[in-house]
Image (tube, grey):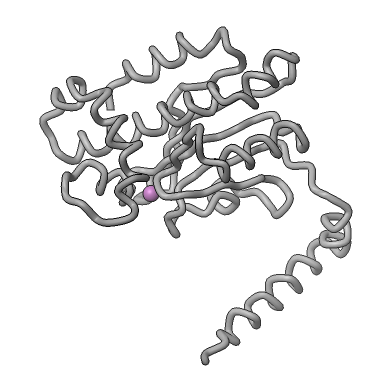
């Protein structure tokens, strides 16, 4: 069996370089975490949360799945949101998708791929919901980009409608939900202008976000 020794070597090098810069870094982290951000992103290997926003271990609480989908019956994702909001008291939840997302691509094609079909169904629902707007986009690439964006907007909306986030807002906890998209081809993030700081923001932010032209 191959034990990947090179990864352990890289790990030792990394830990040593961090200590060189900040000798108490790991000792401080060992005392606990106080991240202000929950990141909900795609599991795609090209979209590593901490790296693309230049933050260190301890700065971001992270949940990733295929195509950054937030489903109310997904206990994994909902538990992450609950822990982040109720215990860690994060101030921001960022739903971040990316252009060229394989999950969104698979959902936009109609062939069946197996177990993942049930998961992709949630993105197919997004596609159906916005079908007439998407059909107005004649270029295939632009239509795919727009579906990636709309998927972020809809999943951010699902975060806003979750029991945990609704309860946090009811108790006046400071919490904002954001929808961002990342471009793998240039490494840059784009704000999809779906920034929601309370239930009163949901309808207008959603309207603005879905009205944007890709
Ligand atoms: Co993806």
Residue 34, quarter of the rendered image: top right
Residue placed most toward the observer, 72 or 204: 72
The residue under the point 42% across, 37% down is 181
Residue at the extreme left of the image, as rendered: 138
Left or right side of 178 for 112: left
Question: Looking at the image, is 178 positioned above or below residue 117?
Answer: above
Above or below residue 175? Residue 181 is below
Q: Position of residue 144 (x, y in %)?
A: 23, 38
What's the residue at 40%, 45% (across, down)? 67
Where in the figure is residue 129, as x and y percent of width and height?
27, 23
- Relative to 40, 138 lies left or right: left
Say if 183 sits above or below 209 in the image: below
Residue 36: quadrant of the picture: top right
Q: How many marks?
A: 0
Give 9 or 33, whichever is nearer the viewer: 33
Q: Which residue appears at 25% of the width and 23% of the height? A: 130
Q: Is residue 177 left or right of residue 57?
A: left
Check the picture and name the quadrant holding the C terminus.
Answer: top left
Q: Position of residue 133 (x, y in %)?
A: 20, 21
**Rendering coords of residue 37 (x, y %):** 66, 37
To which quarter of the image does residue 150 belong?
top left
Q: Please, is residue 55 above or below residue 159 in the view?
A: below
Say whether residue 37 is left or right of residue 73: right
Q: Residue at x 67, y 16 (%)?
A: 169
């Amino acid at each position: 069996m191959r034990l990947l020794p090179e990864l352990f070597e890289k790990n030792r090098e990394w830990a040593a370089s961090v200590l060189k810069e900040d000798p108490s870094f790991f000792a401080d982290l060992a005392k606990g975490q106080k991240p202000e951000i929950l990141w909900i992103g795609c599991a795609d290997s090209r979209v590593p949360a901490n790296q693309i926003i230049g933050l260190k271990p301890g700065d971001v609480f992270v949940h990733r799945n295929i195509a950054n989908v937030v489903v109310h019956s997904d206990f994994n994702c909902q538990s992450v949101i609950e822990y982040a909001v109720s215990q860690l008291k994060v101030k921001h939840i960022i739903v971040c998708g990316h252009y060229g997302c394989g999950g969104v691509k698979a959902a936009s094609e109609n062939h069946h791929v197996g177990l993942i079909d049930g998961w992709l169904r949630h993105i197919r629902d997004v596609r159906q919901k916005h079908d007439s707007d998407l059909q107005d986009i004649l270029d295939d690439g632009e239509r795919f980009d727009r579906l990636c964006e709309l998927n972020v907007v809809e999943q951010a909306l699902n975060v806003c409608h979750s029991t945990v986030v609704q309860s946090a807002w009811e108790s006046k906890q400071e919490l904002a939900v954001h929808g961002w998209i990342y471009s793998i081809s240039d490494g840059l993030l784009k704000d999809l202008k779906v920034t929601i700081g309370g239930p009163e923001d949901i309808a207008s932010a959603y309207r603005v976000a879905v009205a944007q032209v890709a």
